[in-house]
Image (cartoon, rainbow, N blue to C red):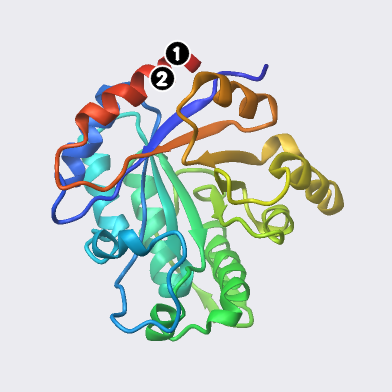
Amino acid sequence: MSARPLFGVCLLATDRSPPPHVLAREVEARGFDMLFFPENSHVPVHRAKEWRHAEHLLDPLSRLYDPFVALSAAAVATERLLLGFAVCLLTHRDPINTAKAAASLDLLSNGRVILGIAGGALDEAMRNHGSAFRERWRIVRDRALAMRAIWNMDKAEYHGEYTNFDPMWCYPKPLQRGGPPLWIGSNSKWVPSRVADYADGWLVFNGRYEGNAAEDLRAACVRRERDFEAVTLALMNAPREAAAIDAQRADGFKRFIFMVPPSDEEPYRELDLLARLAEACA
């Protein structure tokens, strides 16, 4: 079997939960490798369609801290914990400001950032940010490539479908060579080709991808002449049985993120249980 997997947790840091820096200290103290916070700027009151998989999360998702602020607090409170976005919604953000924020966080955290990215799920929320739902993945790709240009070029320049800027100086640059790794968080049949095209990893939500994620990503990497072993396959909402985790490891998954249900109570008992499982699977 491959080298030791990394284990992390995804928490909903809200104004009703313990503060992000407190959560981060508790996660690191229990030996986890990664901490992920999601992003959601707002929840429109009036929505044309139900938000599949997330109707019960509408209240906590309307209360999330901005992930760049929350993970900055987490960075100050920890030393080794990898700081992840699950996910940063590029359809909701200006790419120049986002590139600067991600680079700043990566530099100040000593290179600990994992930038999960996606387009989002709510049509109305995207339109509030000036993005069209049907164009969301073209927007994500365009802004991701623009951010990479900023991170990797002294005089950054980019001319794309949705992002356009002439040569400019934009510092600081990230500490990680090439910038923080970009992991796409989505589960459609088109994701493997997107990952192979412009990303460094794939956050697969357990049970939602209709296919074999590892096999499909491997095939997409062959088509794009990418090294499959250099692309990270991460499982969100990782199973809570050691045997199931071992099976996913054998299938190519390298990172496992447990989801901690939203609660107004302290999540530490849940973290204790997950920490023991992660230790047993290490």
Residue at image location 54% in from the left, 24% down from the top: 5
For label 2, the crowd category at 10 Å Cα-Cα, with few meaning under 14, some 14 to 19 and many 20 or more, is some
Q: What is the x, y in percent for residue 199?
A: 63, 53
Contact between marks 2 and 1 (CB within 8 A): the answer is yes
x and y percent of residue 218 in the render?
78, 42
Answer with left or right where residue 163 lies relative to residue 198.
left
User: Residue drawn 61% across and 68% down?
Assistant: 141
> Image height check: is 135 above or below 74?
below
Q: Can residue 282 be seen in this view?
A: no
Residue plotted at (50% across, 58% down): 117
Q: Quadrant of the N terminus?
A: top right
Q: Which amino acid does label 1 sit on?
A: Ala
Residue 61 position by quadrant: bottom left
Image point (32%, 59%), residue name: 57
Q: Mark 1 points at which residue?
A: 280
Q: Quadrant of residue 49?
A: bottom left
Question: What kind of element bears circle 1?
Answer: helix
The answer to whether any part of residue 273 appears in the image is yes
Reply above or below: 51 against 76.
below
Q: Is mark 2 on a helix, strand or loop?
A: helix
Location of mark 2 (residue):
277
| In the foreground, 100 or 225 | 225
Q: What residue type is labelled 2?
A: Leu
Cα–Cα span, label 2 and label 1: 5 Å
Report the number of discs: 2
- Estimate the x, y position of residue 113 in percent, counting from the top left: 42, 44
Corner quadrant of residue 134: bottom right
Residue 269: image location, x then y, percent: 22, 27
